[in-house]
Structure formats: C-alpha cells, structure tokens
Image: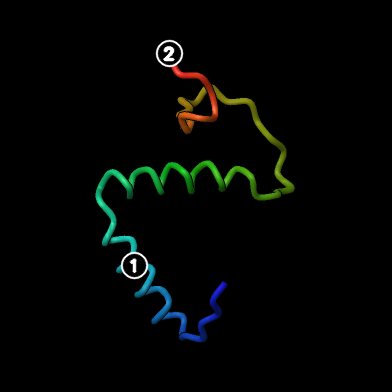
C-alpha cells in the first residue's frame, strides 16, 4: 500500500485522468461495480422492495453460465 499526500484537487485530477485512460467498456463495468457497492454501505433508511430492473454481473468463476 502506498500513501500519498496531495491536495484534494490534485487527487481528483489524478483519479479523473486514470478513469479517462480506461476503455469505454471498462468505464461502464466500473460504473456497474460502483453501483453494486453503494448498496453495501450501511444506512438507517428502511429497505424497500422495488420492481426496478436489476443487472447482476457475474465473473465466469462465480456461477455456472449457460
């Protein structure tokens, strides 16, 4: 693990450049992964059942495909 001491603006700029260096497909996958991870954060709000469209992304070794 590496620790860097930078300003918030500099850190945000580095993150933006790294993100923009990804291919469009990698950007979409990162967005989906982030969207999934947001649901894991603890919250005091009650969970609601919804009928929203849900996208589940599996790695090939997570479940049998086919």
- Residue receiving disc 2: 66
Horizontal and vertical percent for residue 37? Answer: 56, 46
Q: Residues within 10 Å of mark 1 (few under 14, many from 20)?
A: few
Identified at 43% across, 77% down, the residue is 11
Asked whether disc 2 touches disc 1, contact meaning CB atoms under 8 Å apart, the reply is no
Question: Disc 1 designates what residue?
Answer: 16
Would residue 48 appear left or right of 19 to someone viewing this image?
right
Q: Quadrant of residue 1?
A: bottom right
Residue 60 image offset from top left, x and y in percent: 46, 29
Asked if residue 3 lies left or right of residue 19, the reply is right
Q: Secondary structure at mark 1?
A: helix
Q: Position of residue 51 (x, y in %)?
A: 53, 22
Viewer-proximal residue among 55 and 64: 64
Q: Percent position (x, y) of residue 35?
A: 49, 44
Q: Nearer the viewer, mark 2 or mark 1?
A: 2
Q: Which residue occupies 46% across, 25% down? A: 53
Q: Nearer the viewer, residue 53 or 66?
A: 66
């Amino acid at each position: 693990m590496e620790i860097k001491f930078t300003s918030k603006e500099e850190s945000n700029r580095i993150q933006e450049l790294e993100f923009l260096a990804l291919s469009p497909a990698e950007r979409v996958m990162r967005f989906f992964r982030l969207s999934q991870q947001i649901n894991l954060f603890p919250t005091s709000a009650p969970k609601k059942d919804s009928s929203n469209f849900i996208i589940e992304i599996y790695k090939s070794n997570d479940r049998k495909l086919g």
